[in-house]
Image (cartoon, helix red, strand yellow):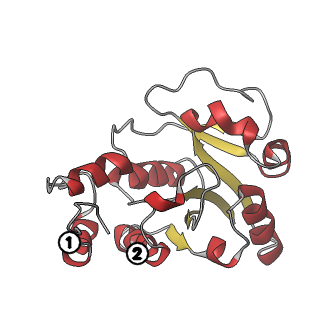
Amino acid sequence: MNIALYSGSFNPIHNGHIAVAEAALSNGFDEVWLVVSPQNPHKNEEELWPFETRLKMVELAIANHPGLKASDCENFLPRPSYTINTLIFLQNRHPSYSFRLLIGGDNLRKFQVWKEHQRIVDDFGLIIYPRLGSTAIPYEYHPNVSMMTAPLLNISSSEIRDRLEKNESVSGLVSTEVENFILQYIRTDPNGSVL
C-alpha cells in the first residue's frame, strides 16, 4: 500500500487539512494517515489542546472520508515527536507499505532544521502541497520529491482558536462534527482562554 503521512498538531483540524488529505488520495495514494503529534519540537506545547481532544476531532472530521485514517502512533513514541522516528516506527511495523511524508510548501523553508531531514527525503520521500505565501521549492529535482495540486484554502488552526477566544463562529472553517464537538466540550475559562 502507498501511504501518505500527513503529520500535524491539528489544533484543531480544519477543512483545509481535509482538502489537502483528499487531494493526496486523488494523487494516487491508497490511504492518507493523519498523524496527530503530541508535541511538535518546533511549536509551543502550552498552546496545544490535549492530545486526546485533538485526536477525537480528527476522527470526527474524517469519519465520512474513506481512505483517510487517524493515527495516534506518535503518542507512544518519545517526545518531542520527530518525523524521522515516526517514519521508521511505521515502516518497521508495516514493512510491506510504502510511506511518504505529505508537507506544505511553507514547511520547506525550515525543513533543513528537522531532525535527519535528508534521510526523510532519501529514504521515504516528500509530497509537497502548495500553501499561500510559499516560494521556491528546495529538493524540486530530487527523485523522491513530488509536487501535488491541492486547493489553496486560507484557513489556519490559530485563526480558529482566536475566533473561539472571541466567541466568534467557526462555521465553514471546520466540519459540522468538529464544530459541534468544540461547542459541546470546549469551554472558555474566566481568563478567556480556550481549554
Residue ID at (35%, 39%): 153
The residue wearing badge 1 is: 180
Give percent across and percent down for residue 187: 22, 72
User: Which of 26/192 is in front?
Assistant: 192
User: Which of 69/190 is in front?
Assistant: 190
Q: Quadrant of the N terminus?
A: bottom right
User: Which of 81/100 is in front?
Assistant: 81
Q: How many marks are shown on the rendered structure? A: 2
Residue ID at (35%, 67%): 61
Ranked by sequence position, the earlier of labels 2 and 1 is: 2
Q: Secondary structure at mark 1?
A: helix
Kind of residue indicated by mark 1: Asn
The residue wearing badge 2 is: 53
Give percent across and percent down for residue 92: 83, 73
**Within 10 Å of the Cα at label 2, are there few (<14), some (14-19), or many (20+) other Cα atoms?**
some
Residue ID at (42%, 52%): 17
Please name which of the two marks, 2 or 1, marks the residue nearer to the observer: 2
Q: Secondary structure at mark 2?
A: helix
User: Which of 193/42 is in front?
Assistant: 193
Farthest residue, direction left: 168
- The answer to which image quadrant residue 78 occupies is bottom right
Above or below: residue 52 compared with residue 98: below
**Within 10 Å of the Cα at label 1, are there few (<14), some (14-19), or many (20+) other Cα atoms?**
few
Q: Would residue 19 appear left or right of 76 to someone viewing this image?
A: left
Residue 28 badge: none
